[in-house]
Image (spheres, rainbow, N blue to C red):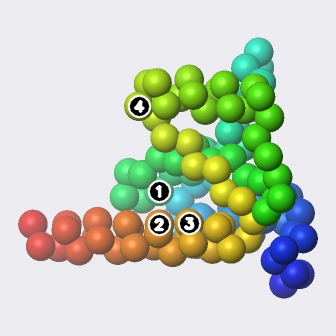
């Protein structure tokens, strides 16, 4: 894998999409005509988790319209994750694995 520090957003997105698929989830590119600045991806997970994710290089910044869209989502109680760089992408996958595992354990115990 290339150096994590300078990894392109597209490489992180490709890696993350692959990890989501390995977890049994689905990855959708979020394109909403007439609504610029929406998050890059929607991830659906087998535990019912739905994640709107904006991916950035470690040195990336949200644009004004992205900040506005994020605020609009948050006003409706919808969380948008902003992932900066490969290290945060790896942490996100670990978090998802834990959530899926916890949901599976809960099903077994009930």
Circle 4 residue: 77
Residue contact between numbered discs 2 and 3, judged by CB atoms under 8 Å: yes
Residue shown at 40% from the left, 73% from the top: 98
CA–CA distance between discs 2 and 4? 20 Å
Q: Position of residue 65 (x, y in %)?
A: 75, 26
CA–CA distance between discs 1 and 3? 13 Å
Marks 1 and 4: which is nearer the front? 4
Most extreme residue toward the left is 110
Marks 2 and 4: which is nearer the front? 4
Q: Earlier in the sequence, mark 2 or mark 4?
A: 4
Residue 53 is left or right of residue 98, and the answer is: right
Q: Position of residue 56 (x, y in %)?
A: 77, 54
Residue contact between numbered discs 2 and 1, judged by CB atoms under 8 Å: yes
Residue 92 is left or right of residue 18, and the answer is: left
Q: Position of residue 74 (x, y in %)?
A: 49, 31
Q: Earlier in the sequence, mark 2 or mark 1?
A: 1
Residue 14 in sight from this viewpoint: no
Mark 3: give few (<14), some (14-19) or many (20+) Cα within 10 Å.
some
Count the marks: how many? Answer: 4
Most extreme residue toward the top is 34
Q: Earlier in the sequence, mark 1 or mark 3?
A: 1
Marks 1 and 3: which is nearer the front? 3
Mark 1: give few (<14), some (14-19) or many (20+) Cα within 10 Å.
many
Mark 4: give few (<14), some (14-19) or many (20+) Cα within 10 Å.
few
Q: Is residue 81 above or below residue 19?
A: above
Residue shown at 75% from the left, 65% from the top: 85
Question: Which disc, if any, is residue 45?
Answer: 1
Circle 2 residue: 96
Residue contact between numbered discs 1 and 4, judged by CB atoms under 8 Å: no
Circle 3 residue: 92
Residue 32 is left or right of residue 45, and the answer is: right
């Amino acid at each position: 894998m290339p150096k994590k520090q300078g990894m392109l957003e597209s490489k992180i997105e490709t890696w993350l999409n692959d990890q989501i698929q390995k977890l049994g989830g689905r990855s959708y590119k979020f394109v909403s005509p007439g609504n610029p600045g929406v998050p890059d991806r929607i991830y659906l997970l087998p535990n019912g988790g739905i994640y709107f994710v904006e991916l950035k290089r470690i040195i990336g910044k949200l644009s004004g319209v992205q900040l506005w869209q994020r605020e609009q989502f948050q006003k409706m109680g919808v969380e948008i994750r902003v992932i900066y760089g490969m290290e945060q992408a790896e942490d996100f996958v670990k978090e998802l694995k834990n959530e899926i595992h916890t949901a599976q354990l809960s099903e077994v115990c009930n």
